[in-house]
Amino acid sequence: MRHFIDICDFDKKELNKIIQNAKRIKKNPKKYYQICQSKTLGMIFQKESTRTRASFNIGFNKLGGHSIELNADSIGFGKRESYTDIIKTLSQYIDILIIRNDDHNIIKKLGSLNVLPIINGLSDLSHPCQILSDFLTINEKLGDIKNQKICWIGDYNNVLRSLIELQNLYKFKLNIVIPKEILKKNETQIIKKRNKNLMITNHISEGIKFANCVMTDTWVSMGEKSTKKKYFKNYQVNSDIMKKASKNAIFMHCLPAHRDEEVSSELLDSKNSVVWQQAQNRMFVQQAIILDLL
Ligand code: CP
Ligand code: NVA
């Protein structure tokens, strides 16, 4: 049984196949209208979500399947009954489950039961669906990912961890710009992932030079304390900062954005910003992930 829990669980050949399929679905959605007929997707969100919830639900319906969201409180997920007993029960009715959870280990444990395919819809540790669909967006906007120079400015978080895993596979240039206080807290983990194309700095000017793609995300992820915001006050991505990157560099953000915090409102709405295409591609890539697992 296969699961989609982390980018690092896959090799390039497998990920390329998912991306190629996502492109096919995007180009010719009608061909896939019945491919998941009589299949059911379960969805459990223990944290807020707009894009992941909507794109999985609508995406699966467009494949001819049926989806059901099980409200974690209503089913007493891990409270009324153990996580594992709930998953074993659900596997009697549903074919595949996407779960968003605060504890990555729970998602891994549910996967290891091998009673139904599990998709990680974001955990404290990673956000593989986001980064795989960003791979498609980069490919559409800029071409082969191996030739890109991506600059991440912001927190060391779930989205960045998945991006680093993608970089470790495809070896594109990745410059990570993070405040030194955040770096200090995560140094040992980050250093382990270093390679000749992965650079870490706390100077925006150093990291953004020659970048043709600039990415950021919220300074405070769901479930974290807002006290860390103070470290980021000089790390907003805006049009002035984008001038230091390559000409016509694209701006990416997984959303939700906190306008005029990590990104200025004018940059988010500018022609450099590809955030709506990013949101759109979530659906096609997730449809391809589902087809790969089923
Ligand atoms: N980018 C993303 O996963 O958005 P949601 O949190 O709204 O699902
Ligand atoms: N890092 C963010 C991503 C949201 C999609 C969070 O975990 O809140």
Image: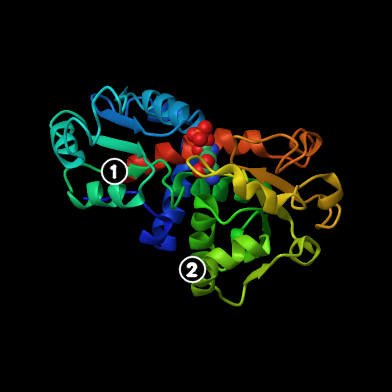
Q: Which label sits on residue 151?
A: none
Q: Is mark 1 within 8 Å of ligand 1?
A: no
Q: Is residue 281 left or right of residue 290?
A: right
The residue drawn where x is 61% and y is 77% is: 196
| Label 2 residue SS | helix
Q: Quadrant of residue 257?
A: top right
Nearest to the observer: residue 242 or residue 226: 226
Nearest to the observer: residue 200 or residue 9: 200
Looking at the picture, which amino acid does disc 1 mark?
Answer: Ile
Residue 32 sits above or below residue 84 on the image: above
Q: Is residue 157 left or right of residue 275?
A: left
Q: Is residue 28 left or right of residue 243?
A: left
Q: Residue 69 in the image: state x and y as whole percent.
A: 32, 24
Tell me the distance, in whole angstroms, between the alpha carbons under discs 2 and 1: 26 Å
Nearest to the observer: residue 242 or residue 220: 220
For disc 1, the marked residue is: 118
Looking at the picture, which amino acid does disc 2 mark?
Answer: Gln
Q: Residue 198 in the image: state x and y as whole percent.
A: 61, 70
Q: Residue 9 in the image: state x and y as whole percent.
A: 36, 60
Q: Quadrant of residue 45?
A: top left
Q: Quadrant of the C terminus?
A: top left
Q: Earlier in the sequence, mark 2 or mark 1?
A: 1
The residue drawn where x is 55% and y is 70% is: 187
Q: Residues within 10 Å of mark 2 (few under 14, many from 20)?
A: few
For disc 2, the marked residue is: 189
